[in-house]
Image (cartoon, coloured by chain):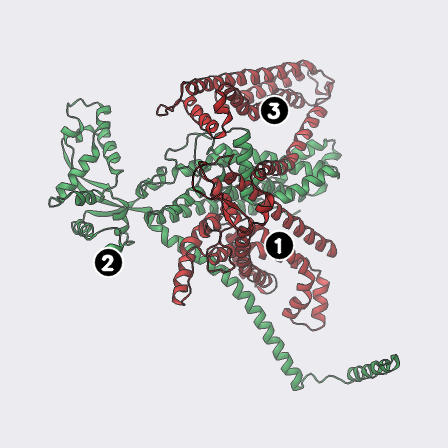
Amino acid sequence: MSLSFLLLAVAALCALSFYFGRQRAVALSGGRHSNLHSLPVHYGAYTAAWCGLPALFLLLIWYMFQGSVIEALIVSDLPQEVIGDSGRLSLALNSISQIAAGGGEHLTVSPEIVDAGRRLANLQTIANAALVVVMLSVALAGLVLSYRRIEADMRARNNVERISRAIMIVCSAIAILSTIGIVFSLMFETLHFFSKINPLDFLFGLEWSPQTAIRADQVASEGAFGMIPLFVGTLLITLIAMCVAVPVGLFSAIYMGEYAAPKFRAVAKPALEILAGVPTVVYGFFAALTVAPFLRDNGAILGLDVSSESALAAGLVMGIMIIPFVSSLSDDVMSQVPKSLRDGSYALGATKSETIRQVIFPAALPGIVGAVLLAVSRAIGETMIVVMAAGLAANMTVNPLQAVTTVTVQIVTLLVGDQEFDSAKTLSAFALGLVLFLVTLGLNVFALKVVQKYREKYD
Amino acid sequence: MTDMASLMEDRAAAKVISDNLRKPVDWDSPKITRNIKKRYAAERRFKSYGLVAICLALLALCTLALSIGSKGYSAFYQTYVQLEVTFDPAVIDPERTGDPDVIGRANFDGLIKQALRDRFPDVTSRSDKRDLYGIVSGGASYDLRERVLENPSLIGQTRTIWLISGDDFDMLNKGYIDPTVDEGDRRLNDKEVAWYNELVAAGAVEKQFHTRFFTSGDSREPELAGIWGAAVGSFYTLLVTLALSFPIGVLAAVYLEEFAPKNRFTQIVEVNINNLAAVPSIVFGLLGLEVYLNVMHLPRSAPVVGGLTLALMTLPTIIIASRAAIKAVPPSIRQAALGLGASPVQTVTHHVLPLAMPGILTGTIIGMAQALGETAPLLMIGMVAFIVDIPGGALDPATVLPVQIYLWADSPERAFVEKTSAAIMVLLAFLVLMNGLAVYLRKKFERKW
């Protein structure tokens, strides 16, 4: 039975138990609802919750552990020399799962592997059958037990509300859980990585070329994992993006908020917001196929040697993407400057632009700095534009006409395609991810604090 | 200088200022007129900077739209070549069994090649023949098979049929390959261009609406590739995302807005939600790779994993929007419900949530639109695989529209540029539709209390 049928079955059981619980409450009331503590619906909801929730909880736990338990069982039966070698082990597991899925006729593998494949298929069938049986019996048990507990003076509503409050708490805790999940999954693989590569080499190394030798006797470099060139590239592209986004975003926010006629604003504001809604992959395509060739051709006319994957193209397009972000945030901040400051300035005879430049802008400066920092953190974490328009070579340069690479580009290149979770190459992506996470987190926390402090000042 | 001396100096300065103040200002003096002129010029300059900034942003938007539109519109049409195909019974069904299995296995490719050789009888050399076969797409034989299976009486007849052309001829017909440039610099040699011209002169080349682009899955051949597979994958992914993030997000918002006590836990949750909203999307991809694939062993490339990953990303958007919508419901509604004896949960479910629902739905649609355009985290969990089949469920390997765009943008064939742009247009159309729906909902159900 597939997962969706199982879920449907549980849902049907829930509906059934709702019906039974309600019926029983109506029967107990003897025709007068005032004989009951709660409304009949609450008794129904009570039984339905006890029928469905434990079963769903069980399903969640089951799916978390089924894969690893079965794998452990399979691995324990493999010959010792396969288990000892992690490369051979992952290869063997791969063919085993292929055989279990009914394919793998073309594979030339030892009979143990074929046996293990059959065993895996067997185990999976057993596990699925067991899941169905266990889940349905848990649901039924919940139904019967809660049904028998229904009495006229049972506090069904309070019970149901306590359950729903618990569900709500769990739902809000998911935000914490995912942060913990991010930190732990990145930490775990990063520690793995640091057991192979010296953390100091990673943090302060000036060379990045994540090639590792596939065979021990191969003539290949050890691979260099210094992340400084990646950060230089990231910062270069971010800087270019900010040079576009900050002035354009700030001035359009000022014009929109102070000068524009309502009709103009009604058209221009949504148009600017469209820029924020365009998927980044579209910007990437635009950067790679329109902006980069345009820059290269015009650079050639001017006698400049512009690389076809220049940092400039990626940075410009990223700047365009961030314009609405900067403009809406700074618009927000500037409209919070108290009216009294503005009126005071006008009363002294200042023109509009003098008021903006000498009163509103200085007053809003902390908020604007916060907005720009948020925009920077966004630019640092932006992926698709740089993957499609920036290069792969880790050049240590600040020349915007050359190709540079960024942290996010390297994460994507390292993890798309074959992944070996025992090689420094794959693991380094997680270390980069951790650094990226920490940097953007730091920027965000700082920026939000600045903005908040600023808000309090004028509240 | 002594203190006394400096004090004297200050006094003198103060006297000058007070004298000046006492003197009436001559507003018409040339100095002040000049000054005012200067200030007004600065004002106009400043204002024009703002206008220029907005124009620059709008110009960028227009350039983006134009460059994609002009590159992509031609992908909705496909070149077809008219050929006289003989449905030779000796090739299709030598024993005249009429069995669909036998017909299905027949060499329809050979029929097309024969038709091409008949059309251009003077082509003899091996390499020329290979070039000649490039006029018609490799996928045309499937169309031919469908046709014969549908109508077996065709066997033995000769029909004039429009066949889908190969990508290079399609590009030539759409004007992307310039036949006037040097032979070595273009994908088609002079002979091929001559055949093309001959076919055009005979009226045997035509552009037809390219329905296959909307109905088929991915392919290595640009003329056969379509977006339906990616669209279905996007649909399943968004379904999983919606099924998870909507209930969880709304419940979390209700809790934080209506029930949560002001304690440490609530504070941590709020800080976390704000931070999650700003975490780079690729980090969520790393989380998905590690937790869903490495720990939970869910299937790679499956929409369910994509949906789980995107759900975590969409959650902050939905929570923040829902909280704003719930906050906008006036407290008097709650007080009235509580005063009539409703419990806090009843107050929320019967009164607050229904009133906040338009706002919540608007936020959800905007979150879904973001999820639809998201690419980077899905690259991490293997949704970049080359998948020809249309996915049949959330556990089948699949790809999504933005990833399909990324894959096609990476392909070297010239014909994929227009396919990519066309796919972008389709994606943007979906996004405009969703955002339009959100705006409509907001306009229609917006209530001022």
Frontmost of labels 3 and 2 is 2
Image marks 3 and 2: residues in contact by CB distance under 8 Å: no
Q: Position of residue A294 (x, y in %)?
A: 40, 60
User: What residue type is disc 3 on?
Assistant: Phe
Q: Chain of mark 3?
A: A
The residues bearing labels 1 and 3 have C-alpha atoms spaced at a distance of 41 Å
Q: Which one is in front, B92 or B34?
A: B92
Element at label 1:
helix
Q: Quadrant of residue B213?
A: top left
The residues bearing labels 2 and 1 have C-alpha atoms spaced at a distance of 52 Å
Q: Say which mark, if any, is on residue A57.
A: 3
Q: Position of residue B410 (x, y in %)?
A: 39, 46
Residue that appears at 46% across and 55% down: A403
Residue that appears at 45% across and 19% down: A116
Answer few, some or many: residues within 10 Å of disc 1's Cα (few below 14, many 20 plus, some between 14 and 19). Answer: many
Frontmost of labels 2 and 1 is 2
Classify A131 as above or below B159.
above
Q: Chain of mark 2?
A: B
The residue wearing badge 1 is: A373
Q: Say which mark, if any, is on residue B182.
A: 2
The residues bearing labels 3 and 2 have C-alpha atoms spaced at a distance of 69 Å
User: What residue type is disc 1 on?
Assistant: Leu
Chain green in the figure, letter:
B
Classify A71 as above or below B428.
above
Q: Quadrant of the C terminus of chain A?
A: bottom right
Element at label 3:
helix
